[in-house]
Amino acid sequence: QVQLVQSRAEVKKPGASVKVSCETSGYSFTNYYMHWVRQAPGQGLEWMGMINPRGGGTSYPHNLQGRVTMTRDTSTRTVYMELSSLRSEDTAVYYCVRGNYYDYWGQGTLVTVSS
Amino acid sequence: EIVLTQSPGTLSLSPGERATLSCRASQSVSSSYLAWYQQKLGQAPRLLIYDTSSRATGIPDRFSGSGSGTDFTLTISRLEPEDFAVYYCQQYGSSPPTFGQGTKVEIK
């Protein structure tokens, strides 16, 4: 069955970077785009960008350009999301999700940014 | 970017009642690429509907989606106790993909 397993929760100081991983299994890795979505406490869902596992091409929203980087490792079927220059507003649960409509979700990774 | 506005913000209903949730887009959603998700407290969202009206795998038929252009609806024909949750719409026809702000369906 399809599984997306994310790395554990992180606590970071303002200005630091965080890298979250998402290991996939149960389907053809290169056949589906992978997206990242985040949810701040008590808030809605925000799209953070996507990566094409086949060629590694990426697309990011304007508000995160320059701070977010998505990569993939086809040998381990894993995608990564790195967010730099962290600020308190980046405190959120980060999800990796499969496809253009998100039929499978990772379990979420809580990233807390606090001094 | 396409802004999605969901209404109402909160819907207070009793089990067995019909729920009608609205999602309005600021411009036409390309190819009816609109999805609905359900999220319960402390859980990841779950896909209910994609392409406006197609039910995702394992989703009961009391959930249905409809609409076109800029107006979309999620209908839950008879609310079960497990349906009380927050619901989000999402468009994926234009970049960037965007979400509505959510509708909370609560027990009356």
Image: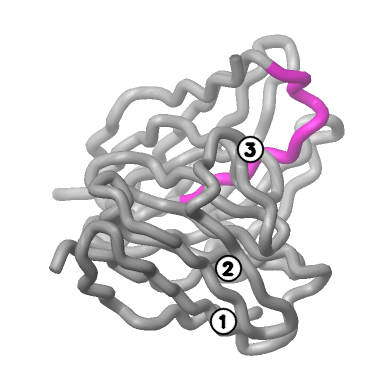
The amino acid on which the numbered mark 2 sits, given as a three-letter code, is Thr
Res A91 seen here: yes
Q: How far from the left and from the top, in percent, is residue B28?
A: 74, 84
Q: Identify the subunit bearing mark 3.
A: A
* Labels 3, 1: one chain: no
The amino acid on which the numbered mark 1 sits, given as a three-letter code, is Val
Q: Answer with mark 2 or mark 1, whichever residue precedes in sequence.
A: 1
Label 1 environment density (alpha carbons within 10 Å; few <14, some 14–19, many ≥20): some
Toward the viewer: B59 or A100?
B59
Could you say whether the residue bearing mark 2 is in a helix, strand or loop?
Answer: strand
Toward the viewer: A42 or A75?
A42
- Residue with the mark numbered 1: B3
**What separation in Å lies between label 3 and label 1 (alpha carbons)?**
22 Å
Based on the picture, tell me whether residue A72 belongs to the magenta stretch: no
Q: Identify the subunit bearing mark 1.
A: B
Left or right placement of residue A63 versus residue A92 in this view: right
Q: How far from the left and from the top, in percent, is residue B22?
A: 48, 78
